[in-house]
Structures are given as structure tokens and as C-alpha cells.
Amino acid sequence: MAGEGVEIRVVKIHKPEDVNFILGQSHFIKTVEDIAEVVVGAVPGAKFGLAFSEASGDCLIRIDGNDEDLIALARDNAKVIGAGHSFILFLRDCYPVNVLNAIKNLQEVCTVYCATANPAEIVIAESHQGRGILGVIDGQKPRGVEGPEGVRWRTGLLRKLGYKRG
């Protein structure tokens, strides 16, 4: 039947190198305010921009945040992704680890696809009805296996960042 095919495409997330983002799927317009409250409550002084794509009604991209550049970044990337009920949150002066569990625990959040500062591509499926996110290509593929020097570097980094003691 005509109109029943699916087109697969990959869209690139555009962002500055020093910005992290979280990409997910939710089911309710309340997502916008709830995610904004999580960020503000978790890390005072964090800068963020958020966009949520409605999947019914007016089908608008709803935005929030406290940094105009990050809000514009979220809005523009949400337009390119174009998947209903998806949200994208850009963070500066804050890491995803600071807010991720609180976001995952929001009643309306269904899925978190990624939380990263890496270059990323989003795998999108498009049908006659709309678009959906199939997955994320986050960074590059592995080049080897960690050895003792890599373990020392990793554990040292976590202590330097304050995530581990000792």
C-alpha cells in the first residue's frame, strides 16, 4: 500500500564542544516545566536550554531555559530531529550525571536515549505519520581495551572531578 514505507535517516546534533546534552522521549507537555525545575533545583547556576516536541494538538516545539544561546540550540536541534514527544536538554556549567536520575524519575519521561558531550548522530525513522528516534550514535567506536595506565588515568580523573574520594 502507498504511504506505508519507512525512511531511515541520520541527523547530526549541532552544539559547542563544551556543552552536554540529554535526549529523551516523554509523553506529556508537563515535561517542559518538570525538566526545567529538575535542572534549577539540582545545580544552582547551571545554564540550560530545553526543547520538547509535541506529538498532538498544535504539535509545537515548546522551549524553556535560562540561557538564550542554549535555548536556541535546543530549539534548532529539536526542529532537525522532528520526532514527536522527544526532548533535548543542553547543559553548561552542569553535567548530565547531576540531573539524569531526577529526569529519568519524572512521571512523564519514558526513555533517555543518551547523555553526552560527544559528537552525536540521531537515527530517525520517518513514516507518513511522523518521525521517531531509533537510536543514537554517541562518539566514536572503541579503539582498544583499557590497560593499567588507562585505569590509573580514569580513576585519577574521577577523583580530580570530585566524583570519588581518596
Image (spheres, grey):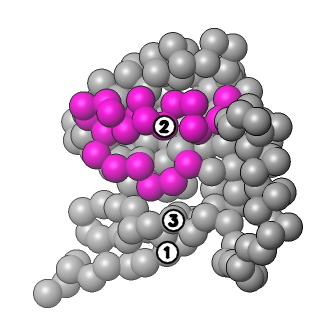
Residue for point 24% across, 31% down:
107
Which label was assigned to residue 136?
3
Residue interval drawn in magenta? 94-115
Task: Locate residue 105 relative to residue 75 in the image: left or right.
Answer: left
Q: Which residue bears the numbered disc 1?
A: 9
Between marks 2 and 1, how big is the CA–CA gap?
27 Å
Which residue, as the protein is rendered here, is positioned at the far left?
Answer: 1
Q: Are marks 3 and 1 in contact (CB under 8 Å)?
A: no
- Residue 106 is covered by the magenta coloring: yes
Residue for point 83% across, 57% down:
153
N-term-proximal mark, 3 vs 1: 1
Which label was assigned to residue 107?
none
Q: Looking at numbered disc 3 in the image, what kind of residue is underneath it? A: Val
Q: Which residue bears the numbered disc 2?
A: 100
Q: Looking at numbered disc 1 in the image, what kind of residue is underneath it? A: Arg
- Give residue 137's quadrant in the image: bottom right
Q: Is residue 16 visible?
A: no
- Give residue 49's quadrant in the image: top right
Residue for point 40% across, 19% down:
33
Viewer-closest of 3 and 143: 143
Q: Looking at numbered disc 2 in the image, what kind of residue is underneath it? A: Leu
Q: Position of residue 25 (x, y in %)?
A: 35, 47
Q: Position of residue 1 (x, y in %)?
A: 14, 87
Instruction: State the SS at label 3.
Output: strand
2 vs 1, front mark:
2
3 vs 2, front mark:
2
Q: Is residue 26 visible?
A: yes
Q: Position of residue 97 (x, y in %)?
A: 57, 38
N-term-proximal mark, 3 vs 2: 2
When the figure is inspected, residue 12 is found, relative to residue 97, above or below; the finding is below
